[in-house]
Amino acid sequence: MEFSCDRKTLANSIGIVQKAVSYKTTMPILKGIYLELKDDRLKLIATDLELGIEHEIEVDTRKEGNTVVDARLFSEIIRKLPDAEIDLTLKSDNQLNIKCQNSEFNIICHDPNEFPALPVVEEDYIYKIPQDLLKNMINQVIFATSQDVTRPVLTGALLEIENDILNMVALDGYRLALSRGKVESVLDNKVIIPAKTLSEISRIINEDDENMDIILTKRHALFKINNTKLITRLLEGEFINYKQIIPSEYKTKIRVRTRDLLNSIERASLVAREGKNNLVKLKILDGKIYISSNSELGEVKEEVFIELMGNELEIAFNSKYIVDALKVIEDEEIYIEFTSNLSPGIIKSTTSDNYTHLILPVRLS
Amino acid sequence: MEFSCDRKTLANSIGIVQKAVSYKTTMPILKGIYLELKDDRLKLIATDLELGIEHEIEVDTRKEGNTVVDARLFSEIIRKLPDAEIDLTLKSDNQLNIKCQNSEFNIICHDPNEFPALPVVEEDYIYKIPQDLLKNMINQVIFATSQDVTRPVLTGALLEIENDILNMVALDGYRLALSRGKVESVLDNKVIIPAKTLSEISRIINEDDENMDIILTKRHALFKINNTKLITRLLEGEFINYKQIIPSEYKTKIRVRTRDLLNSIERASLVAREGKNNLVKLKILDGKIYISSNSELGEVKEEVFIELMGNELEIAFNSKYIVDALKVIEDEEIYIEFTSNLSPGIIKSTTSDNYTHLILPVRLS
């Protein structure tokens, strides 16, 4: 293996695949990045056996080949070299020689045959979705995935394709986040993607509306974004029937400025935080919502102007769940619907049906 | 106590004193900020009994008084309130009422009589020094203070005033950093200031050349910067006679571009890091210095152009100590002087005598 390439291009490519490297592993080979040089293209691959990331760049090939380099060391070397052309040569003693201006490294490599191959994903059917839309949808739901590994399906998000609509859903037993977007599709589908994969996709994809590809098989999902492929294992199991959970009727509905409500609840939670449940109380009256909270540190009262439709209501929430949801909403104004102080609050857009956030209340003693 | 003030001004003031708050203390009162309102001025004080910071702002006073508020809660409340006028009132039940637009807090206060008074520092003699100079001098030496609490004097830096020169010195047994600057003085002096105090001063002072005041007593130092006073306990004990340590002669002297040497040593240390001593070897020849390092991960060779005066030399260092020193040097080029591979390397400016860094070598086996 022998090639030259530009430092910045290589550093960028390492940065993309590096997130799939498993640094805490009992399999040392997984701490590496697999390099494969063929036809003037260098392929970089990293995997933690759940998520695999592959990225390709064009390089100036002198001799094809493959090897595995320590991810951390290789990335730091390439990051610290001068911004110039780098020459890389795999030598017969299995060391990778890296030359750049007045610097020369020889780093010990691993056997590329030990590196686990990424699963082969048959590209029978390809869904197309704009990159910025998928990024935004992930952002809208990922915080609501569960950390509780005893219920694996909840540590991911459901991707449900019905006609040309993609519903992305996450829930953790206390709140549910649903995001909805248009996808090019004629084939319905339903898979559960691990949260870590979604957050890596969101990190890699661009903020533009260029389409990317999604391929779903029984056990895997493949996301193709420009020169990058992400292949992830799906979470096995049945996702909760989320549609049943979301009430379609309400007795109280408010219209409120998102930012005003967010700021007031964040302030109220400063005093509440010392307690365990971050409890904030909402008293919904005609024209105003009174938000209050107290602990041994003191008390706080906030007033936010609202438009009330339906009944007045007193209800309490864990402030964290409201704050998490309001933070990802870009609409200036939102609706919140309630049925009683024992049933969830439902946050909806005033301008579209792109998202729904459901938050369980805390029972007041 | 009753007053109004602008949110930003108060938030800024809290930010300044907050660094002296001791959050991990067995004395709950020290988790607070002392507020004293008198003559249209609000004084904020925090202390951890070693360092005290006092800051004053002008406010619109309606009733004088004093109290102590929980530092963390108060700071977060003021930070999160809208950018507007805030009304603060100490109520008879010892709660501080904070009103701002549609927000109202009542936070429980502590007894201000329990708050320890800052030491009184007699301002018999005042040294004057430009703020940016002191900031730069602190930056030049603070990293060389020791973390080893069994030798308390080394956890601070010596401030030695001789004629109108301030020498600031820190050393930890492996390296020494000396910074030199002009001070307005007719009174020689010698004190040891805790590293934490110096880093707080550096954080607070501006990057401009306006003078600040330093007052030194037997047990304390007072730094006055605009509306801020920092009062610190001095470290007791005798500082090492550092002048004796710095050799005045050399057998090898090089002139090198600071940035080139720094980059090469940083790269060399990538491979060395796995070992315990970060060992990098320097082979100093006429016109070039060869830097090398190796570990079970691989090896690295770097070449840096130099101008050599005197003998060729092979010597080894802990790369961290060289990197720390080179990072704070702004000169484009430096001198480094050596006597043998068992005696320290001395880094000096090529343009002034503002700093000296001394680094002990590692004996090669």
Image (spheres, coloured by chain):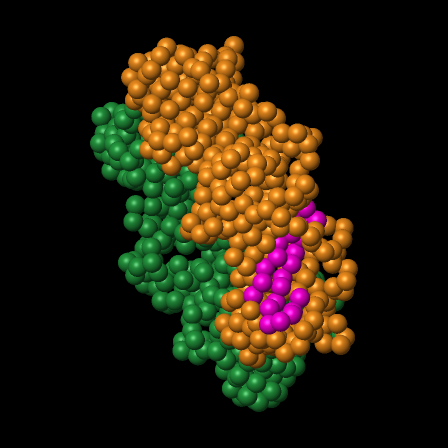
Chain colours: A orange, B green
- Give the residue displayed 53% in from the left and 27% down from the top: A176
* Quadrant assignment for the N terminus of chain B: top left
**Horizontal and vertical percent position of residue B321:** 58, 66
A53 drawn magenta: yes
* Quadrant assignment for the C terminus of chain B: bottom right
**Horizontal and vertical percent position of residue A49:** 70, 49
Nearer the observer, B151 or A195: A195
Secondary structure character of the magenta stretch overall: strand
Q: Is residue B254 above or below residue B72?
A: below
Quarter-wise, where is residue B100 in the image? top left
Magenta residues, start to end: A36-57
Nearer the observer, A51 or A25: A51
Q: Is residue B71 above or below residue A338?
A: below
**Horizontal and vertical percent position of residue B334:** 47, 77
Position of residue B82 in the picture relative to residue B201 (left or right) = left
Q: Is residue B224 above or below residue B15?
A: below
- Give the residue displayed 57% in from the left and 80% down from the top: A102
